[in-house]
Image: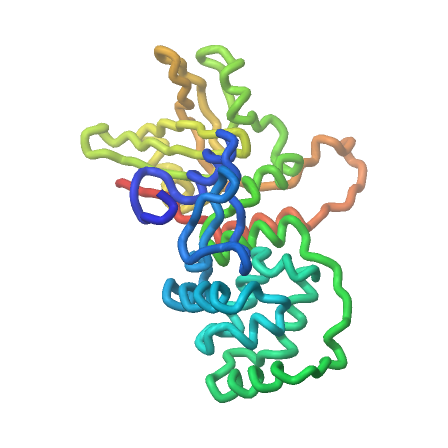
Amino acid sequence: LFNNQPMGFYSLDALGRDANRHGVTVALPEVNRSDVYCTVEDGGIRIGLGFLRDWGWDIAEQLVVERERHGPFQGLGDLVRRAPARLSRDAIENLVWVGGCDTFGLTRRELLWQVGLWLPPKAEQPARSRVRRQLELPLVHPYESLRFGDVAARERLVAEYDVLGFSASGHPFTLLRNELPAGIVRSDHLETLVHGAEVQVAGLVVARQRPETARGYTFILLEDEAGMMNAIVRPDVYERDRIAVRGEPFIQVTGTLARDDGTVNLIAEEIKPLNLGRTDHAAAGTPYRVDERPFSFLKDLRRHAPSSKNWA
């Protein structure tokens, strides 16, 4: 499925997390282990280099051939020297951002710093050839040994969405759960609620369907860190909240729980964009400092969110 996209009902993002829930590991691209396409590795899935933004299958294949002929890459300088000349600085930075060069023993910020030392932005062929010749000499850049802290978990997850179009590190809500509005119920807790219960859920939209035969009803499949949820949207709710229903990647749904022959659905009464900022822990009138980082994280996630499957 990973190697034959686009196809089917689920995105790679949803497929990867479903694999995780069934005990299958999805490993990020790694310059000395990944093939061009996804492969089976230790009973899990290793993402291929061809899935990286700004790479392409042909460049990935050239790099894999080089590695097989002359051995693993020993460091970033060795990678820049031996990689196909058409592999741009942006492409190498994308590899670094998703952990593809972690094997070199430096933090991702240190690796990004070194990429900037050796390759100018949008390096053209003459500049790249000059760099390759320089790296063949046993020279040390005076600023090459500077040390930087690693990127945070939130930055890593956003980078995966930006570079791969999906995340192999987990669901965004694993890093946002404590910031969600009070009263939001996890998907795995819906089974404990009775038919007719009023409930609020939130999640990443996986798919939207509005079949012509459904008399104007819309069906939304959304996902949190624990699993999938189905929301059924009446025509009047769709018309009132259509901006959130049609365009928001992260939504908050308020509605009534419906049980039917073992199936649990949420009959939506209100759908709105997900907002953060819990204040229930603060006493009324008590000043408190708002942490802006979760808001920035959600903003970045919205900008790089995986595409949902839409049939409407």
Question: Do we see residue 202 in this rendering?
Answer: no
Comparing 102 with 133, the one in front is 133
Q: Residue at x 56, y 82 (%)?
A: 132
Q: Is residue 92 left or right of residue 36?
A: right
Residue 137 placement: quadrant = bottom right
Residue 283 placement: quadrant = top right
Question: Do we see residue 220 in this rendering?
Answer: yes
Comparing 197 with 146, the one in front is 146
Point out the image quarter for the N terminus: top left
Q: Residue at x 50, y 52 (%)?
A: 161
Q: Residue at x 61, y 85 (%)?
A: 134
Q: Which residue is drawn at 53% across and 23% down?
A: 188
Comparing 6 with 240, the one in front is 6
How is this picture coloured?
A: rainbow
Total number of numbered discs in the rendering: 0
Comparing 254 with 64, the one in front is 64
Q: Is residue 14 left or right of residue 115?
A: left
List x then y, in percent, for residue 51.
43, 56
Q: In this view, does 124 lie to the left or right of 275?
A: left
List x then y, in percent, for residue 15.
42, 39
List x then y, in percent, for residue 232.
36, 27
List x then y, in percent, for residue 104.
66, 62
Q: Residue furthest right?
A: 286
Point out the image quarter for the C terminus: top left
Q: Which residue lies furthest to the left in this view?
A: 213
